[in-house]
Amino acid sequence: MATIDREVTARVVLQQCLHAKLQVKPPDEDSEAEWTEIQRGMVIYLCFFKGSTKDVIPKMVVSFSVSSVLNVKLSETDSGKHVSVVELPGDILIVPQATLGGKSKGRCMQYHSNAGKELGMELYAQFISQCQKELESHPSWVEAGAVLRHGTYGNRQVLQLNTNGPYTHLLEF
Amino acid sequence: MATIDREVTARVVLQQCLHAKLQVKPPDEDSEAEWTEIQRGMVIYLCFFKGSTKDVIPKMVVSFSVSSVLNVKLSETDSGKHVSVVELPGDILIVPQATLGGKSKGRCMQYHSNAGKELGMELYAQFISQCQKELESHPSWVEAGAVLRHGTYGNRQVLQLNTNGPYTHLLEF
């Protein structure tokens, strides 16, 4: 059994992809839906809990003592070796996914532990900007033309995903 | 914060989908890859830990006291109401995903808590057969022509996913 005994302030699900496309603006009367997309790289589904502070973000993004989303070796090279998404170098798509904070009660899910909308939005924005900053400090990632894309907080995350094995991992902080 | 304090014997990630396609046999010299696919419904990523027994399967599949994969209300109807995948009625794709048992150590993931291959394969097969049996007891699900499909344990899970919002949830048992 896996014994889990700690407080969690953020939950992340990671999947590697060959291509992913995410709606960032739903269609309305005047305009079509807007989409963002990435090629080979990593999709990061992200959820913050109540009590999270911006202090958790560096741990999630760039920590060297724990597995952070940018340094954990979960991207597969052509030769089958596992490296970080920065080392790949691969694209990154960040998807806000408050549903990951759900806790089951009877047949329904409740989200009482989730960060409120204002805090969640602020932490989401900080997560993106710290990822961007960290990525820009890696010349090999930048020069490869890799990109960071992200969804719109609070929107429905209409997603299309093409993988060579999603290689789904859970990280908690 | 979300306080988590218990032993986990199985971990499941659920995503709703409009269409999903999964490779069940990789290509070889003599034949092309074989695929299975579902339409609107639910993708179940599944991982068993060491110490799991077949006793956990009924809880995961059909329990009425906790949220099981078949009764939890995580499928959205056209009118936006949340119902179970059985009530939708929707297709189901079961994907073995041992990577979900990973625990980070430094920059790498380790899988020491995962059920061994033999136990994992047995529990995976039982999970599928208990799902199938339960689904067949719901005439409305059967008569709607909904299907249960699954990946091949131990294979690379090459997956294509098309969602109207993956609505990603984590359940642990």
Image (spheres, coloured by chain):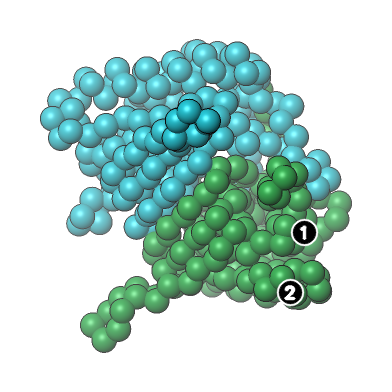
Chain colours: A cyan, B green
Mark 2 lies on residue? B142
The picture places residue B61, in percent across and down from the top left corner, at 74, 62
- Element assignment for label 1: loop
The picture places residue B29, in percent across and down from the top left corner, at 23, 82
Residue B52 visible, this orientation: yes
In which chain is the residue bearing label 1? B
> Where is the N terminus of chain B found, in terms of image quarters?
top right
Residue B87 marker: 1
The picture places residue A117, in percent across and down from the top left corner, at 62, 18
Q: Choose top left, top right, bottom left or bottom right for residue B30.
A: bottom left
Q: Residue at x 33, y 48 (%)?
A: A19
Left or right side of B5 for A139: left
Q: Is residue B141 above or below residue B104?
A: below
Q: Residue at x 30, y 83 (%)?
A: B31
- Seen as rendered, the residue at the extreme front is A30
Residue A171 visible, this orientation: no
Q: Residue at x 79, y 62 (%)?
A: B62
Q: Is residue A114 above or below residue A15?
A: above
